Image (cartoon, rainbow, N blue to C red):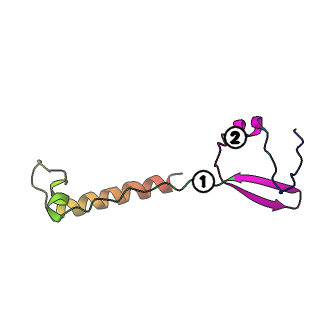
């Protein structure tokens, strides 16, 4: 524990060991949280710029689709596969 004094202008110096332990560099912003048991310093998370997303054209989007190169699939085959998977999941859930 380190003891510091509040300066005439109200500043409170933070010991170097504390700044180093938390990675606080000069210019870092801290929130001061006043609680019942004392005061807590919390670093303000730096806002990171989110790069603008490139808007795709419909042609670019469709070109990204995986290509299916298997045998032709009918609506009946899709329906059968969905029902089989639903039954498998039902059986798995109810066997526990």
Percent x, y of residue 66:
19, 51
Question: Tag 2, which secondary structure?
Answer: helix
Q: Contact (CB < 8 A) between labels 2 and 1?
A: no
**Residue 18 sits inside the magenta stretch:** yes
**Residue 64 sits inside the magenta stretch:** no
Question: Tag 1, which secondary structure?
Answer: loop
Percent x, y of residue 2:
87, 39
- Between 55 and 86, the one lying in front of the other is 55
Judge from the rendering whether residue 81 lies leftward or rightward of residue 73; answer left or right. right
Percent x, y of residue 34:
82, 61
- Between 66 and 49, the one lying in front of the other is 49
Range of the magenta residues? 16-42
Q: Residue at x 79, y 39 (%)?
A: 15
Q: CA distance from mark 2 to mark 1?
A: 13 Å
- Between 67 and 2, the one lying in front of the other is 2
Which residue bears the numbered disc 2?
22
């Amino acid at each position: 524990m380190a003891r510091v004094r509040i300066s005439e202008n109200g500043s409170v110096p933070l010991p170097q060991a504390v700044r180093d332990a938390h990675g606080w560099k000069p210019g870092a912003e801290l929130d001061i949280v006043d609680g019942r048991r004392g005061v807590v310093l919390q670093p303000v998370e730096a806002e990171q710029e989110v790069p603008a997303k490139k808007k795709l054209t419909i042609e670019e989007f469709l070109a990204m689709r995986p290509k299916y190169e298997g045998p032709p699939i009918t609506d009946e085959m899709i329906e059968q596969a969905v029902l089989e998977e639903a039954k498998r999941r039902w059986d798995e859930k109810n066997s526990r």
